[in-house]
Image: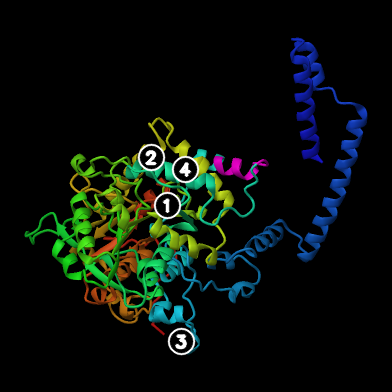
């Protein structure tokens, strides 16, 4: 009734204002704005009383269902139970409830990537598994995400592990979402075109026509998906058959491996080479840069090579592939044969906080980034994958896309209806309205993208300073191009000495989530820092092939996210300063994992 009354007042005010505007009589206009007839007031009053009585009845029944309570704390406890009943409760929250067993059997066993996982997944008997599960094999057990998700839920700590921002999207993106949701005329609350909402594919085609310096057909060369992960999945499903090989540059985002296996393909790893700044000087451990050595890629290429997955800017290292490295990849695509395609994962393309030299960026329309498909002869051999989540700090929007020639996009279009009918129409419409606004001046910058890079550059430096003070070796971004929002920090001998010796021995060293079930130096350091120092980072071993992780090639690095609010980074900095001291900032005692 309140909403009805407010709307009536607004319409009454508008009607009177319009009717009297021609008379130019302000006194009459004001009088009419606030004049409401007595019958109208009585009617609205009766509606209000009726609504109040109905609400009172509903709330009385609801509180009676909670059982008796007599104090303010009882009321708070019951209200907390109502809140917790809609989601998985953390251990801290369970301790505040009268009956902790109420939630003890509610365990989230779903695996996840860069998110909050509360526990390890159950392993179903493989004899009962379907083909997709069998292709994953031993990869269906606990993961780094479930293990460190559990630790984060058990402790109050500074979490630098999760790869997504912890702040709201920019105002214009939220406004676009609200306006799309409330648009009665367009009503984007029903199904839209399966291959992509028309307004969005037109916006994407316009932008990529500029990026790739060619006309992109919105209906035949664009496909919209539920996030970039689904775009990658569909690309691999439409390209790969059993026996095909897919090249990954190592280290790599671990999602790729299982998606290749689900398609029936075989991952082939091409290690990137870490070159420290003090190469040849054994006296000091420094940061450095990751480079692609041409001969390693040439050895991996074969007639079986169906695809090469390129991720630039790169997760987890932050590497920005140079134009010359991309040209090496392009040459090997041609050598591999006409069947070879590049899947270019470019979700971080607008976060290049340390751009390459200008001579590397000839003709690019996206500052600091080279679109692989823009290289000579590579348009016909490339599927470009991206999304809105990282760019607009809205990973929950889950809208991704593929841009490619029609002979590569058509199979994706054909498969899409059997995966989901369409990505969210509301979110697609919101993104279509957001994209042009991002090009406008924002917060004193020429556009939103300049602001975004400036923000991440400042956060990177804030975290980098803390990591250096803690004893880690990090990239020198004046020398090394960098993108994304991770620092791949190198473990120094001083940090290794700080880890308690028992952390590298059973039972701590046995962990089914670690590669081969054995904890390496990187994992031991991260778990110790989380459990005893109050800061959570991610070990590097999950980003390496199992063989190289077991061999110790990943021992020297950890992945640290700086896509966090300044308060979180400052809290992490304080915790990091205690890494080489005896101070303990974690609230709970460490828990050993026995591997059973």
Q: Residue 209 or 2: which is nearer the viewer?
A: 209
Residue at 32% across, 78% down: 243
Residue 178 lies in magenta, yes or no? yes
Q: Nearer the viewer, mark 2 or mark 4?
A: 4
In the rendered image, the quadrant that contains the C terminus is bottom left
- Residue found farthest to the left: 280
Lower sequence index among marks 4 and 1: 4
Write down the region rendered in magenta.
Answer: 176-185
Query: Whole-Å distance between the Cαs marked 3 and 2?
Result: 47 Å
Predominant secondary structure, magenta span: helix
Q: Residue 385 or 172: which is nearer the viewer?
A: 385
Disc 2 designates what residue? 449
Q: How crowded is the residue under tag 4: few (<14 C-alpha within 10 Å), some, or many (20+)? A: some
Disc 3 designates what residue? 126
> Tag 2, which secondary structure?
helix
> Tag 4, which secondary structure?
helix
Does the rendering let one see residue 230? no
Tell me where residue 446 sits by quadrant.
top left
Query: Whole-Å distance between the Cαs marked 1 and 2?
Result: 25 Å
Disc 4 designates what residue? 203
Q: Do tag 1 and tag 2 residues touch (Cβ < 8 Å)?
A: no
Query: Whole-Å distance between the Cαs marked 3 and 4?
Result: 45 Å
Does the rendering let one see residue 129? yes
Residue at 59% across, 73% down: 106
Disc 1 designates what residue? 221
Q: Residue 447 or 234: which is nearer the viewer?
A: 234
Lower sequence index among marks 3 and 1: 3
Residue 112 appears at what percent x and percent y?
Answer: 46, 67
């Amino acid at each position: 009734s309140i909403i009805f009354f407010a709307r009536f007042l607004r319409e009454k005010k508008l009607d009177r204002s319009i009717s009297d505007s021609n008379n130019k009589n302000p006194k009459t206009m004001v009088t009419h704005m606030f004049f409401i007839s007595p019958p109208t007031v009585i009617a609205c009053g009766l509606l209000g009383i009726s609504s109040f009585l109905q609400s009172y009845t509903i709330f009385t029944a609801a509180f009676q269902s909670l059982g008796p309570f007599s104090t303010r704390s009882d009321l708070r406890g019951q209200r907390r139970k109502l809140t917790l009943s809609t989601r998985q409760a953390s251990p801290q929250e369970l301790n505040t409830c009268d009956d902790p067993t109420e939630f003890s059997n509610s365990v989230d066993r779903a695996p996840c990537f860069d998110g909050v996982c509360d526990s390890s997944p159950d392993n179903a008997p493989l004899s009962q598994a379907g083909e997709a599960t069998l292709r994953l094999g031993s990869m269906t057990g606990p993961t780094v995400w479930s293990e460190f998700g559990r630790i984060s839920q058990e402790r109050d700590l500074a979490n630098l592990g999760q790869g997504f921002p912890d702040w709201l999207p920019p105002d214009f993106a939220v406004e676009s979402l609200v306006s799309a949701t409330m648009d009665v005329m367009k009503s984007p609350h029903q199904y839209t075109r399966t291959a992509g909402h028309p307004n969005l594919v037109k916006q994407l085609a316009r932008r990529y026509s500029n990026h790739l310096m060619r006309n992109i057909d919105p209906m035949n060369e664009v496909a919209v998906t539920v996030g970039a992960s689904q775009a990658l999945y569909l690309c691999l499903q439409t390209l790969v058959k059993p026996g095909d090989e897919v090249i990954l540059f190592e280290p790599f985002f671990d999602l790729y491996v299982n998606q290749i296996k689900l398609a029936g393909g075989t991952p082939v790893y091409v290690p990137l080479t870490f070159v420290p700044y003090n190469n040849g000087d054994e006296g000091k451990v420094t940061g450095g840069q990751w480079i692609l050595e041409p001969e390693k890629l040439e050895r991996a290429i074969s007639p079986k090579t169906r695809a090469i997955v390129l991720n630039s800017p790169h997760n987890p290292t932050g590497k920005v592939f140079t134009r010359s490295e991309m040209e090496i990849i392009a040459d090997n695509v041609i050598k591999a044969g006409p069947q070879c395609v590049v899947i270019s994962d470019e979700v971080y393309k607008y976060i290049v906080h340390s751009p390459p030299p200008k001579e590397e960026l000839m003709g690019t329309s996206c500052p600091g980034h080279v679109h692989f498909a823009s290289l000579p002869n590579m348009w016909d051999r490339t599927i470009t994958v991206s999304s809105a989540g990282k760019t607009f700090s809205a990973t929950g929007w889950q809208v991704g896309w593929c841009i490619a020639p029609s002979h590569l996009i058509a199979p994706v279009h054909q498969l899409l209806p059997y995966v989901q009918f369409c990505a969210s129409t509301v979110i697609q419409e919101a993104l279509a309205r957001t994209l042009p606004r991002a090009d406008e001046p924002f917060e004193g910058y020429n556009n939103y993208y300049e602001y975004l890079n400036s923000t991440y550059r400042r956060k990177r430096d804030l975290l980098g300073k803390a990591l250096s003070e803690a004893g880690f070796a990090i990239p020198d971004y004046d020398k090394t191009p960098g993108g994304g929002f991770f620092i791949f920090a190198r473990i120094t001998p001083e940090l290794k000495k700080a880890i308690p010796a028992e952390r590298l021995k059973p039972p701590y060293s046995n962990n089914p989530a670690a590669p081969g079930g054995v904890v390496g130096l990187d994992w031991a350091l991260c778990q110790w820092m989380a459990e005893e120092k109050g800061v959570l980072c991610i070990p590097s071993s999950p980003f390496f092939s199992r063989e190289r992780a077991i061999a110790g090639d990943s021992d020297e690095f950890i992945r640290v996210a700086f896509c966090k609010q300044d308060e979180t980074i400052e809290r992490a900095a304080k915790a990091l300063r205690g890494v080489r001291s005896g101070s303990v900032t974690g609230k709970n005692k460490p828990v050993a994992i026995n591997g059973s």
